[in-house]
Image: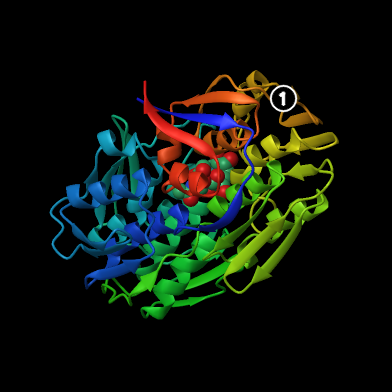
Amino acid sequence: MDYLEITGPASLQGNVKISGAKNAALPIIAMTLLANNTVKIGNMPAVVDIKTLLKLIENLGGTFSFTDENSVEINTCCLTNTTATYDIVKTMRASILVLGPLLSRFGHCEVSLPGGCAIGQRPIDLHLKALEQMGAKITIHAGYVQAEAPQGLQGAHIIFDKITVTGTANIVMAAALAYGTTQITNAAREPEVVQLCEILQESGVEITGIGTAELTIVGREQKLIDFVPFDVIPDRIEAGTYLCAAGIANSSITLENVRHDHLEAVTGKLEEMGFTIETTPHTMTIHPTNEIKPVSIITQEYPAFPTDMQAQFMALATQANGTSTIEERLFENRFMHVSELQRLGADIKLNGHTATVIGPSALSGTDVMATDLRASSAMVIAANIAQGTTQVHRIYHLDRGYENLEKKLGDLGAKIERLKE
Ligand code: EPZ
């Protein structure tokens, strides 16, 4: 297995180009199951999770080809199979995103239960309950969701008990080919869901309420969609990660190809900590502060502070002058980076879903382990300012969602190398 060797402390300077958003690209790839044409997608991030979902599309009988490293054309006109098997779904739970489109288009499908992951049990009960409301017959058998809707899905009024990002995406896609109109109350408003709705709308699906918690979708009665070509939006979490990398290293860097309007909660907290952020329509520049102030963070659904930035801010908070508190409200087990940061010398106390970080603490390099995707990036940015050499192991987590991280960070001045165990 690969690991990263990072020697700190290192300051950062220069520009970094932000890649397309993994969490926008995944529902978009699932959306191609609704297509009547070959779908042309640009700014596709070259990360493992994307490759995994494309392999699933291929297993279903779809085809894809990359016209360059970040541009792909996907065709699902001749699907031969509607079963998403365990071997793929177990490696990437967002595979559940094929459930809604497959069921709505074909009237039947089998999708392996995704299972939990390191950060939590991650149930899909809300996805399934909504599809049942749309007329699906759902049974769970031998670890698979078996879904039937032989007459197609019917529009319904779905009220989500909890805001669910992929749940909203699944139902939007299912509703696009349903018979009748679907209203979703308490819909997720994440930019990744907004882009999915915008592409569907630009391709002829009647959708109103985009960007709000109330979505209305007029079903096309299983008439497939001719999609317009488009580029995936920039990855707001990758962008936030690099902002934290610069902040913790008291450095100034510029992010290119970024949507700062997707990062307002994140930049608000960085400014509270003393950093200055300059923006233009497609760039963000962070400037260091002579004293990093402590911060209080609660993770919530968009547009509030994102859970996917929690670990990175915990790393940053280790260098704040005072006591920071971080409350994780979305996932039940998203603090596994705490013990790894403590190995570097961080002073963090856990009490249920709240971490208290006392800073500043001098960090020293040692062996640490990546435990999930975003925790991995937190370890990397902390290692970059730790005194000495750090080995970050199990970086397959990192490769799922960060494109060329060691090259991007290396080009900014970090001493970082990918080695083999
Ligand atoms: C999406 O996961 C993201 N993944 C996650 O990013 C992100 O952390 C999460 O949204 C929250 O923003 C993708 O978009 C591929 P949820 P998702 O359904 O959709 C509970 C990353 O690092 N829930 O919004 O799976 C659930 O347990 C990943 O890129 C139910 O109870 O998250 C959680 O507590 C990690 N029943 C809360 O809702 C359900 O049926 C939010 O989950 C569905 C969800």
Q: Residue at x 64, y 67 (%)?
A: 261
Asked if one can make out residue 182 in the rendered structure from this viewpoint, the answer is no
Across the whole image, how many numbered discs are drawn on residues? 1
Q: Is residue 240 visible?
A: yes
Q: What residue type is labelled 1?
A: Ala
List the single residue furthest toward the right.
322
Which quadrant: the N terminus?
Answer: top left
Can you give x and y, in whole percent of width and height, for residue 59 in the image? 18, 47
Circle 1: is it few (<14), some (14-19), or many (20+) Cα within 10 Å?
A: many
173 sits left or right of 188 in the view: left
Instruction: Examine the rendered structure and indicate whether residue 325 appears above or below residue 195.
Output: above
Q: In which quarter of the image is the C terminus?
A: top left
Task: Determine which quarter of the picture holds residue 248.
Answer: top right
Residue under numbered circle 1: 346
Under circle 1, the secondary element is loop
Percent across and percent down for residue 106 are: 23, 59
Asked which quadrant contains residue 333, the reply is: top right
Q: In this view, does 128 lie above or below 226?
A: above
Residue occupying image coordinates x 66% and y 22%: 364
The percent position of residue 94, horizontal first and vertical second, equals 40, 45
Closer to the camera, 55 or 368? 368
**Is 335 displayed left or right of 66 in the figure?**
right
Q: Who's the residue at 80% across and 31% down the image?
A: 360
**Residue 73, image x, y percentages:** 24, 65
Q: Give the residue drawn at x 44%, y 59%.
A: 20
Quarter of the figure with residue 291? top right
Query: Along the horizontal axis of the image, is 134 left or right of 280?
Result: left
Residue in the foreground of this view, choosing between 387 and 363? 387
Scheme of colours in the image: rainbow
